[in-house]
Amino acid sequence: MPRIDPVEAMSGLLVLALGAFFYFGSMGYPMGTIGRMGPGFVPHWLGALSMFLGAVILLSSLRTNEPAPDLYWRPLVAVLASIGAFALLLPRIGLVGAALVTAAISILANREAGWRMLAITSAAIALICWVLFVLLLRLPIPAFWWDL
Amino acid sequence: MDIWANIASGFDVAFSSQNLMYCFLGVFLGTFFGALPGIGSLAAVSMLLPITFYLDPTTALVMLGGVYYGAEYGGSTSSILLNLPGTPSNAVTCLDGYPMTQQGRSGVALFATTIASFFGGTFGILMLYSLAPLIVQWALQFGPAEYFAIMVFGLVAAATVTQDAPAKGLAMVVAGMMLGTIGADLNTGIARFTFGYFELHEGISFIALAMGLFGVSEVILSIGHKIDKPFIQAVTFRSMIPRRDEVRRSGMPMLRGAGLGAFFGALPGTGPSIATFIGYAIEKRLSRHPEEFGKGAIEGIMSPESANNAAVQSAFIPTMTLGIPGSATMAVMMGALLIHGIQPGPQLMQENPDIFWGLAASFWIGNVMLLVLNIPLIGVWVRLLKIPYGILYPAVLCFICIGVYTVRTSAFDVVLVLLFGFAGFVLRLLRFELAPLLIGFILGPMVEENFKRAMLIYRGDFTEFLTRPISGSLLALTALLLVWTTWVILRDSRRKRPVDHPMGEADD
């Protein structure tokens, strides 16, 4: 009984699923002919190719075996949440507020950071962003909610 | 066309006070960002792209070019001092650069890589000077079949050369190409895979994809590993003087590295990283003392650094002559040109020769600036590395968000960064290489367009691709590469473990 490498098996399934998505998803668009291809043609066959590669990777998972990698839940959630906060806040309260909240949430990823470090660092970063991008570089970003 | 007159006029453009100033600004900021671990040239160029919107196109490219090769110069600093590659293409430099630091010889390593970088960069620029005009003459006769074949060859090479798992590399290329089909179809205008989001009509923002896949996933994994306060030794001028035998041993590796780098850089798809891996592997094989590699052999830093910088310069060859970006960072630069309404390709060299020659001249001036700047400033970059990562990464995340938002003034793109950050994290845990995905995404739409156009011209007869000499031989090479790769996979499957990657595990 061959052992199955979880990393390779997951990789194969992921590639297979992605291929299937484009293979079947493109069927809703006109395919055209080989001489006059429609919008569905190229994604359809790329999807087929991807499913084939997914199957190859899945097969190779039967022979290798490596330990499953660690997951980094805390940094993962905190970093993604901080980016989401930026997308949400920038159009509503402007750059300075968004940068402050983004920096603060992302610092939560660091287990060793205390509250004082969080407050000082995120305030400093918000200030740097404002001075650098709005005052010096004059990028067209609203700095505060009254600039919106 | 007199090449000397062109070179002279190029230096005229590059020596204008405005271009000199932005060239300096570019190399300075590039070295700064490159020296910070985790921010590569791609992130540095993307973050600084919005600044150049208000400059004229030549100046914008002069500055972004400076950021690009400046970051590659600076990237070796953190490889050598911290064992953390500043940019992905400096990863190989860790192997022998960090042991040199452990032996208290970081000064020599930093000095030597600066020289190697300058040498490689100069070599790459000479290639750019001599090859670009020839390729342009040739490229004017290229049809869609030739463009298609060049790009397919580049994509397959990017996925298979030096990869541990070629099937996974190819899967990433195809995934990138599939993501590239998202958006309005060029011929019919039909929206593909937009899920009703109007923002996706123009396709996924390349910068959002790159920042999410590389920048964000890198930050997540780095926090996950550990946040250390690095110990960094002081670097004095005296400590930079290499031993005599090291000078002697450096020449040939530097030359071989430059040649390799110029070759792989000029191929669309394969970038500096591949050149550095191969350069290292070749030096190890050629050396009479292969056991010294990994323990501070100077050849092990000279060849990769020279290759890296030669590849950075020669990556401009396909970009400027064919309009095919040679690497992911080049794609951002090409985006910058397109924003200014300039379409790179053979026509550009004919109609706006001053842009090309001015750029090429500014690259060399920038390399001289880096040489002059870096040796006295090494101490400053070293101090920069003392900033703890816990303070650095929240700022990096903010800069990424601001950069992505500004390019299209779109909060939607920031949400895409979030999604691709998650995707990049998962893919890296599953040990996928992400660079092929990005290359596939960039070249995918161009492959599709040229494929469709060629098939329209040849009325659906695929044999035309094979009978035309240039496209036929490139596709034959591609097939050969695939056969060879399959053979390697089958050979390795009989052994227990896959062959050692030249990089091994970057253990810390």
Image (cartoon, coloured by chain):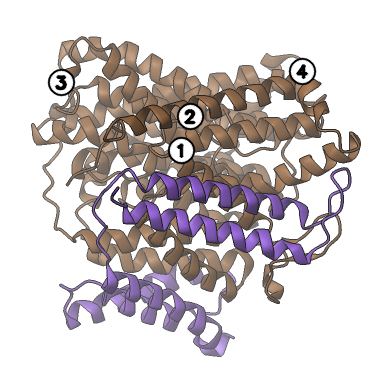
Chain colours: A purple, B brown
Q: Position of residue B68 (x, y in %)?
A: 48, 42
B499 to B188, vertically: above or below: above
The residue lying toward the viewer, choosing from B399 and B18, is: B399
Task: Tell me which numbered mark, 2 or 4, is placed earlier along the sequence.
Answer: 4
Label 4 crowd bin: few (<14), some (14–19), many (20+), radius 10 Å: few
**Badge number at residue B235:** none
**Residue name at image x 40 percent, y 38 percent:** B72
* Residue type highlighted by circle 2: Thr
In the rendered image, residues at marks 2 and 4 fall on the same chain:
yes
- Which residue is disc 2 drawn over? B485
**Residue name at image x 34 percent, y 41 percent:** B75
Q: CA distance from mark 4 to mark 3?
A: 46 Å
Task: Tell me which numbered mark, 3 or 2, is placed earlier along the sequence.
Answer: 3
Side of B433 relative to B475 (left or right): left
* Residue type highlighted by circle 1: Pro
The answer to whether mark 3 and mark 2 are in CB contact below 8 A is: no
Mark 1 vs mark 4: in front: 1
Label 3 crowd bin: few (<14), some (14–19), many (20+), radius 10 Å: some
B378 to A58, vertically: above or below: above
B447 to B106, vertically: above or below: below
- Which residue is disc 4 drawn over? B469
- Which residue is disc 1 drawn over? B166
Q: Would you identify the image quadrant in which residue B375 lies? A: top left
* Residue type highlighted by circle 3: Glu
Q: CA distance from mark 2 to mark 4?
A: 24 Å
**Badge number at residue B292:** 3
The secondary structure type at the circle numbered 3 is: helix
In the rendered image, residues at marks 1 and 4 fall on the same chain:
yes
Side of B266 relative to A108 (left or right): right
Q: CA distance from mark 3 to mark 2?
A: 30 Å
Q: CA distance from mark 2 to mark 1?
A: 7 Å
Chain containing mark 2 = B
